[in-house]
Image (spheres, rainbow, N blue to C red):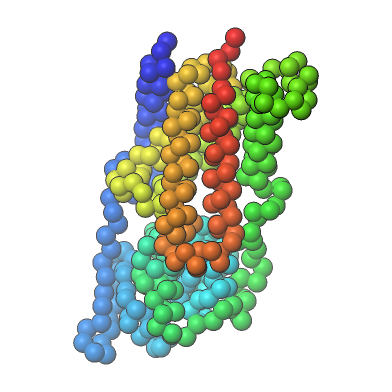
Amino acid sequence: MTMKKQSFIILIGSILLGLCRFFILDDPNFSLIKQKRQLKDIKSEGSNQYSIPDVFVDPILIDLDFAKHLFDSKSAIFIDSRELDDYNNGHILSAINIPFDYHEEYEDVIDSLDYTLLYVIYCNGTECSLSLDLADYLFNDKAFEKILIFEGGWPEWKEAQYPSELANQNRDFTENKNISKDQTLNIKNPDNIIFWITILCGLFVLIHFLSNNNKIFLFKSLFDKIDISFLPRMLLGIIFIYASYYKIIDPISFSKNIHNYHLVPIWTENLAALIIPWLELIIGINLILGVFIEGSKIIIISLLIFFIFILSQAAIRGIDVHCGCFQAINDLAKDQGSQFKLIKRIIEDIVMLAMAFFIKKNK
């Protein structure tokens, strides 16, 4: 079977499986063609008049002036939906930290709140979706009655030099939370294990290739006796199966991750989140079983080139891919953990791309 036919079959299989996953999703708000969220906003009426509806049908957007009024009048509780590290680096005075990405770990905090009170949720500005996601979760899943979203978030509040603090002195809500500790150097982190295995295997394949082509003579006698053609195939197969697992389980979160790159039209984000994980799973299985190798190989190369491109453009454009917000280059450079993760992923994908060219058919 030709490479084109193999690729076509793999792609069709991924689309069908993605559609099946969509029809068994237990979320009526997740549509195949994603629509941009349009929320009602309320602004001040006159110079000093602020009003909110008695009954909320959805979370509502507010501007900086409205947020400051609620803060000064102590009419609302402010919630910071960013990671703990971002929160500790600066937040609205007395705001509670409930990172959306780890909200399952903060259920005790959420359950301790009075769902009848008024809450203002914010994150890193208009490009950040964490506040919208947390607002949706609290309003629809936890039945909070009155949720406002301060769209300008921390950047606008900080620029206006309104009351803020670097670290919450009242640790009642977060003192026992260690959710966002940087794990970039934690050897027990599965992503780090995969990274170092990939790097070591990539070096091994490179040395073997150079030795067989008489470019180097280190351990040449050893490499002449062993066949490692299976190594890139097996390693990439395992990595792609692993990468697909959580995306298949939770395509909704994967769609949000895609959105954070600001690269593809919004209407395609849910489709990509449904299809790409199954594509990764199928080609991973094909590589391990040694079937449809040519079709799987060309898809892997295409995917890795695409992944390298989107990661690189995120770093160049100064996008914090965690929250989907843009940062100045000098601010992004200060966030060494985030930058290190991006660079590490780019290196890993480049090594895997090189290994993909060594994949061969079974003899």
Q: Measured from the top left, where is residue 207 in percent x and y? A: 69, 29
107 vs 259: above or below: below
217 vs 93: above or below: above
Q: Tell me which corner region of the image, top left, top right, bottom left or bottom right, holds residue 360.
A: top right
Q: Measured from the top left, where is residue 266 in percent x and y? A: 31, 49
Residue 154 vs residue 215, the one in the foreground: 215
Q: Tell me which corner region of the image, top left, top right, bottom left or bottom right, holds residue 120.
A: bottom left
Q: In the rendered image, is residue 34 in sight?
A: no
Residue 24 vs residue 290, the one in the foreground: 290
Question: For the point 54% across and 64% down, which residue is it?
Answer: 333
Question: For the point 58% across and 73% down, which residue is it?
Answer: 88
Q: Measured from the top left, where is residue 95 in percent x and y? A: 50, 77
Question: For the point 43% across and 46% down, which residue is it?
Answer: 310
Question: For the point 41% across and 13% down, which residue is it?
Answer: 2
The outermost residue toward the front is 215
163 vs 180: above or below: below
